[in-house]
Amino acid sequence: MYIAEQLKRRSVAEYLLYMWQVEDTLRAYGLDVERMAAEYVPQFGLDAEKSEALKGWYESLVEMMREEGVTERGHLQVNKNIIILLSDLHRQLLKSSKHPFYSAFYYKALPFIVEIRAKSTESQEKGEIENCFDALYGVMLLRAQKKEVSVETSVAMENIAKFVRMLSEYYQKDKEGELLL
């Protein structure tokens, strides 16, 4: 909750990846908030009040996951909405002649996005922006598990990460009313 709040202000891309991680953490604990409160929350070293607030946040997320049918896989609608907003902004930026650097970053990442989409029928059903996040999250999980990431995948992720970072920066500017399209 506290990390999510900080990330949401700083970078929507980092926030979204973090929220996907939270969803998976909740699943790893079997959506058992009491168990999380006993085993997971103490590692953050929070006082009793903040620990209780964090537990409450996890409870609300678990409730939402159950209501939305994403207890085993998938993402909460609030997180899907961010993908929708980013995808809309992405299309607007590509149409605008005012942001050639954005287009350049996108076209540099595009061959890697196409490759990702070609490898999975599930990827083809999703939009490009969600594919980018899926790829970034997948590599993040591999690295967390200390698994090897090939040089080719690292190069692809570097390009996709730069593109997503730029999109995230434009999202922040748009949110603050500073983006001209």
Image (spheres, rainbow, N blue to C red):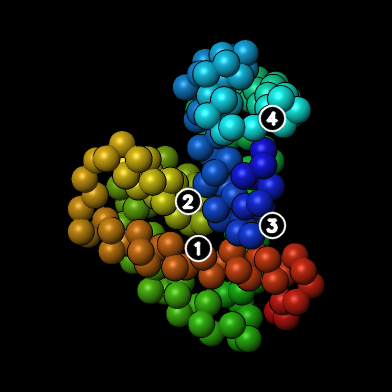
Contact check, label 1 and label 2, Cβ < 8 Å:
yes
Q: Mark 1 — residue?
A: 164
Q: CA distance from mark 3 to mark 1?
A: 16 Å
In this picture, residue 81 sits left or right of residue 166: right
Q: Is residue 26 visible?
A: no
Q: Residue at x 59, y 50 (%)?
A: 15
Q: Residue at x 64, y 44 (%)?
A: 4
In this picture, residue 135 sits left or right of residue 14: left
For the residue marked with disc 2, what is the amino acid? Phe
The local crowd at label 1, few if under 14, some if 14 to 19, many if 20 or more residues have their Cα within 10 Å, is many
Q: How many marks?
A: 4
Image quarter where the N terminus lies is top right
Q: Earlier in the sequence, mark 3 or mark 4?
A: 3
Q: Mark 2 — residue?
A: 133
For discs 3 and 1, the disc positioned in front in the rendered view: 3
Q: Mark 3 — residue?
A: 9
Secondary structure, mark 4, is loop
Secondary structure, mark 3, is helix
For the residue marked with disc 1, what is the amino acid? Val
Secondary structure, mark 1, is helix
Contact check, label 3 and label 2, Cβ < 8 Å:
no
The local crowd at label 3, few if under 14, some if 14 to 19, many if 20 or more residues have their Cα within 10 Å, is few
Q: Mark 4 — residue?
A: 47
For discs 3 and 2, the disc positioned in front in the rendered view: 3
Q: Is residue 102 visible?
A: yes
For the residue marked with disc 3, what is the amino acid? Arg
Q: Which percent across, then down, holds residue 172? A: 68, 66
Q: CA distance from mark 2 to mark 4?
A: 33 Å
Q: Earlier in the sequence, mark 2 or mark 4?
A: 4
Q: Which percent across, then down, holds residue 7? A: 62, 52
Q: CA distance from mark 1 to mark 2?
A: 8 Å
